[in-house]
Image (spheres, helix red, strand yellow):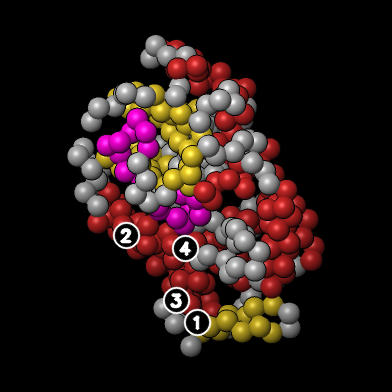
Amino acid sequence: MKEQIHKFTLPTPFAVGDVNVYVLKGESITLIDAGVKTEEAWNSFTKQLNEIGLHVEDIDQVLLTHHHPDHVGMLDYFSPDTPVIGHWRNEPWISKDPNFFDQYDRFFTEFFTQLGVDERFRKYLKGLRHSMKYSCERSLNNQVQEGSVIKGLEDWGIIEVPGHAQSHIALYHQQSETLIGGDVLLKHISSNPLIEPPYHEGEKRKKSMLQYNTSLRRLSELPISCIYTGHGDEVKEVSKLVSERLTKQRERAEKVYQLLKNKPMSAFDVCKFLFPSVYEKELGLTMSETVGQLDYLESLRQISCQYESDRFIYHTH
């Protein structure tokens, strides 16, 4: 590997805790991910950068693993001339495209109503976008996809690993069996496959949990000796951890199946049962997890969904 990998750990205001960003120092100097938009994160970043003999102006380019605010926010502190590289699906999020966010609001209002979310919880829909204040307002200079080659990082390949985010990519160095993986696989916690609105109005939503399971299985099939993660420690035993995560997910789905065997329910009723103490505070996360399990069970043809009284009701077969 021509590049040295420097890991910086930066504070965030989120429950997930600190976020990791990486500086690849080689023919070019590339920053992988860009923390949250807070002075605290920026000061920590510049201090750690100086400790390895670099300044902000030395960074040639920034590569995004995905669009979540804890991975993109500090872009606003960089010079507008610093190239930003990522999958095209980052663009409406990081540029805060108003048309996209109007569509976002319409999608979640309609979809959560169909899922049976009570009217008195509609106020929580407004909170789904709360974290965007820690994001940025930038655009991509270079859009990449599976197989793209990045200037200055010719030995690293791009692979698409959607699920946690539709925009998610990872950077893979085949010779050293190294992956810089963002949030695709974390050592101590499971990544939540989040519901996202379609990128083009009228399209069907992507089934994030099914995508995520596919991405995990793909990782387990690659020769990877180390994953540098978006949060926490590196992952060394990739296949073992993937197997554990997929097993836990199947166990959670089985719990949902047994619940529905007792009586048909809406997704919101299932969510309240699974997350009785946190669903109000974390409506987006808990509904994403719930819908993910329902999508999984539907894919196995263990349950089906019928539209009854203005909402989806899930039945076992």
Q: Which residue is mark 4?
A: 209
Circle 4/circle 3 CB separation < 8 Å: no
The reply to whether the magenta stretch includes residue 159 is yes
Work out how far the residue at label 3 is from the one at label 1, CA to CA, in angstroms. Answer: 8 Å
Residue 44 lies, in percent from the top left, at 52, 20
Query: How packed is label 3: few (under 14 Cα within 10 Å), some, or many (20 or more)?
Result: few
Residue drawn at (64%, 41%), measured in percent from left and top? 95
The residue carrying mark 3 is: 299
Closer to the chain start, of discs 2 and 3, is 2
Q: Disc 2 or 1, which lies upstream in sequence?
A: 2
Disc 4 versus disc 3: distance between alpha carbons? Answer: 11 Å
Decide whether residue 153 is among the magenta residues.
yes
Label 4: element kind:
helix
Query: In what quadrant of the picture does the N terminus appear?
Result: top left
Which residue occupies 44% across, 45% down?
Answer: 144
Between circles 2 and 1, the one closer to the viewer is 2
The residue that disc 2 covers is: 217
Which residue lies under the disc numbered 1?
303
For label 3, the SS is helix
Identify which residue is drawn at 73% across, 48% down.
Answer: 98
